[in-house]
Image: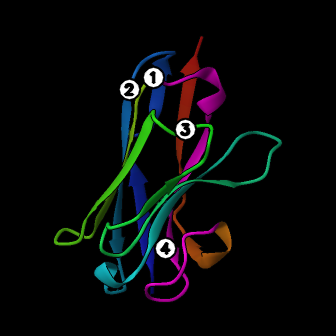
Amino acid sequence: QVQLVESGGGLVQAGDSLRLTCAASGRTFSLYNMGWFRQAPGKERDIVAAISWAASTTRYADSVEGRFTISRDNAKNMLYLQMNSLKPDDTAVYYCAMGRLPGRGLSSGDFGYWGQGTQVTVSS
C-alpha cells in the first residue's frame, strides 16, 4: 500500500522560504515519477512540480517557475520541494503525489496517489 507523508508546511511571510518533505513507502520509490500538487480554498488541485524517476527531467507550473525546485533522494525514498520568494498566492494545501505506473509521464493525469497534505500559508 502506497503511503506518502508530507511535512514542512507552516505560516510564513511573503518573500520567505520553505522546504516541503515527502516520505514515501509501499512501492519501489526509484521506479516512479513524483510530483507536488496544491489546492487553495475553493479551487481545484493543480500540479505544481514533477520529477522523473531518475531525476533527469523536471517540470514546473508557470506560476512557480524560477522560485520552486523539486528534487528527490531515491536512496532515502524522499521527495522535496524547495519554495523560495513565497507569495500570498502560494497559500494552499500541498500534496505529494506518486505516478500511477512506473516511469510514465509528468502530467497531472499520470499521478494516482496522494498524501494527506501539508498547509502552507503566506501572509502579505
- Please give the range of residues in magenta: 86-107
Of the two numbered discs 4 and 2 on the same chain, state the one appearing first in sequence. 2
Q: Which of marks 3 and 4 is in front?
A: 3
Does dot 2 land on a helix, a strand or a loop? loop
The amino acid beneath tag 4 is: Met
Which of the 4 image quadrants contains residue 64?
top right
Give the residue number, with chain letter if any, for mark 3: 64
Query: What's the coloring here?
Result: rainbow
The amino acid beneath tag 2 is: Ser
The label shown at residue 98 is 4
Q: Residue furthest top?
A: 124
**Left or right of 55, for residue 103:** right
Residue 118 is one of the magenta-drawn residues: no
| Residue 49 percent across, percent down from the top left | 51, 54
Of the two numbered discs 1 and 4 on the same chain, state the one appearing first in sequence. 1
- Circle 1 residues within 10 Å: few <14, some 14–19, many ≥20: some
**Left or right of 23, for residue 66:** right
Give the residue number, with chain letter if any, for mark 1: 85
Give the residue number, with chain letter if any, for mark 2: 17
| Residue 3 percent across, percent down from the top left | 43, 74
- Circle 4 residues within 10 Å: few <14, some 14–19, many ≥20: many
